[in-house]
Image: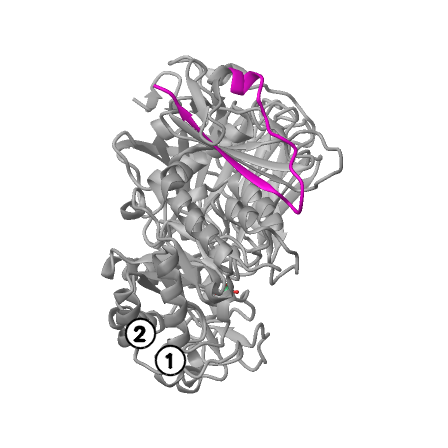
Amino acid sequence: MSIVFHRNTRIFTLETDHTTYQMQIDPIGLLLHLYYGPRVEKGEDMSYLLQYADRGFSGNPYEMQHDKRYSNDSLPQEYSVCGAGDYRLGALLVRQGNGAQGLDLRYESHKIVKGKYLLPGLPSVRDEDQARTLTIDLFDAASGIRVRLFYGVLPSRDVITRSVQVINDGRDAADIEKAASMTLDLPYGDWDLIHFHGRHTMERMPERMPLPHSVVRVGSVRGMSSHHHNPFSILCEPTASEDAGLCYGMMLVYSGNHSQEFEVDQAGQTRAVCGLDQETFGWHLESGECFYTPEVILACSREGLNGLSQIFHRLIRKNLCPPRFRDRKRPILINSWEAAYFDFNGAQLLEIAEKAADLGMDMLVMDDGWFGDRDNDDRALGDWTVNEGKLGMSLKDLSERIRALGLSFGIWFEPEMINEESVLAGEHPDWILCEPGRLPNMSRKQLVLDMSRKDVQDYLFAAMEKVIEEGSVSYVKWDFNRALANVYSRSLPRERQKEAGHRFMLGTYSLLERLTARFPDLMIEGCAGGGGRFDAGMLYYCPQIWCSDNTDALERIQIQRGTSYGYPASAMGSHVSASPNHQTGRSMPLETRAVTAMAGAFGYELDPGQLTDEEKNAVRDQIARYRSLQDLVMNGTYYRLGEIGREGDQAAWLTVSEDKSEALLSLVLTHVRSNPAFPYVRLKGLDPHALYRDKKTGRLVSGRALMQGGYSLPAMYGDYPAVQVHFVKEG
Ligand code: GLA
């Protein structure tokens, strides 16, 4: 059993293959956190870790006033509340009918059931055979607020998921002012925080820092999970490396505003609180109503950062992404964006398609510019009718001719957006998020639709359904090219305006849900100006996300490396683009661009008409190579080689197949020197007893030697040279 409640000690134990999680109902009904970490013996009682001390100015619950050592402010809490004597980070703040905000949550009941819980209207980790759910009800008698804590335990995935339901069982209406998805108290140890910051065209840069004695907060108020702060962070021991040391990962399954807060308290205890951003969120609860927070995925590994990443990779691939794409080969596509931008017609697309087919690709994606009167980025978003004049043919005709070439057909949408200059804006000005009487903040000349409205969702569903049907579309690139501002919904009363941001996300999820149900074979690739919504919420609907608008291979290596801390290679849309690169102007060899793009869901984003015959042959070879490696890249165990910020003159990564029968080493020289050191790496995760053959040189080396003695390569020269070494187990 992965969840056990011990009646005498009143301890809950959650077990995965390699971790244990414990909490205890204390004598006055408070739920204390006991332990989360590497697996301990079955039946072990971890309450010996609780320490009691009079810390001064740390108050006591009323019943415990005789014991100054008992304080909510110093004991580890399972779900922290604001305003009731725990002065550390709170997870929940509810303004009650009489204006009070303190909550005194006491244990009421619990349930253990088979299967993993689901959250209405929200994406969450999918059920699997061994999964179990624990729910614990906590109740505040004075207000009638009930809090239901959800724990999903997936033993073989080594993951625990959490979410919270807030139920107003009081007589008066109440307002939630903060509702995080979890509190995690780590009473002992010093911890480094690794978070992933960035900007447009440079997403998910890891930053590692020791946690100070204050609050550190990262998050987004942009209405999107954002390029700037990913909803994923890691706490690790200060000595933890890529391959050793204790690490905890926290990933929010959400694509909107979020917050990850960390505090080290007066006694050196660490608390993490993750969930919805507080400033931009509020929820009105009438008596009898309830609210669900998004889910947070927790994992813990003592195998260092690589070990932690591998847990998230497996979980996302197997239990989060749409199951129908789990084992399906992804199409090698060519995207029209960097090939033609807005400047194309049907005949030109057919020319690109013809060349792409000749090179061996699988799909043509028609990017932005095919609808309304859109010839640049300042108009027509929202008018999802095909511009037949521009294409010079109907969508049906174009798609048929592309498919006749042996390619499938994909198309770009930006559903949540609208331009002022559009037919839709003239017809439905009330559908736009905007504060009354105020001129809106503009971005890329576009505004945002109020996705909380059912009529907006219905319009988008019908418009997209028509295009997808007409064009026999098998792939949609779902873009999102501005952050939200002036978030005000005309369909909500005053007391519910703070709900607009979260309702916007729920509306987007609902549309995604309807479309994926209507077109089960349609593959949706997420995108938000590249990787501005690269999060577990979108991955629930989209097996892959366009990783960044930066296609410069040298920078992509860094972006993909940063992304790999939380997300698998199979989730990273990654294309070979033209050289010199359109974002940086840097020139890169075609092989280096391909080796970099082969670290994800591979494709091209250039005009094949510009390729020389020699380059065309190279592309044919790359496509054939990727086809033979795709299974390994998408489903293998991924290792970053080299520590954060100490990779030296090379960037290297490795994928080992689950059965350890083959491995792919990729290495790019990021700084070529004269009279250089030899490129060198130690491999990981191989079978020490097996012999592996380097398919290019034919050299045979044991797994143990490759892992202990490593592998060196001849010196490489020129601009950013790259090499792939494919090792295959003998016999
Ligand atoms: C975003 C995407 C690009 C492209 C453009 C089109 O920036 O990330 O790939 O689709 O929009 O406008």
Q: x, y percentage for residue 455?
A: 33, 74
Q: Is residue 549 above or below residue 27?
A: below
Identify residue for label 2. 398
Q: Crowding at label 1, few (<14), some or many (≥20) Cα neighbours within 10 Å?
A: some
Q: Quadrant of residue 132?
A: top left
> What secondary structure is found at the residue carrying circle 2?
helix
Q: Which residue is mark 1?
A: 391
Residue 79 magenta: no
Q: Are marks 2 and 1 in contact (CB under 8 Å)?
A: yes
Work out which quarter of the rendered image holds the N terminus and state it: top left
* Amino acid type at mark 1: Leu
Residue at x-position 34% and y-position 40% = 319
Report the span colored magenta. 705-731
Q: Is residue 289 visible?
A: yes
The amino acid type, in three-letter code, at marker 2 is: Leu
- Left or right of 587 in this view: 4: left
Q: Earlier in the sequence, mark 2 or mark 1?
A: 1
Of residues 510 and 499, the one nearer the viewer is 510
Q: In which quadrant will I find the C terminus?
A: top left
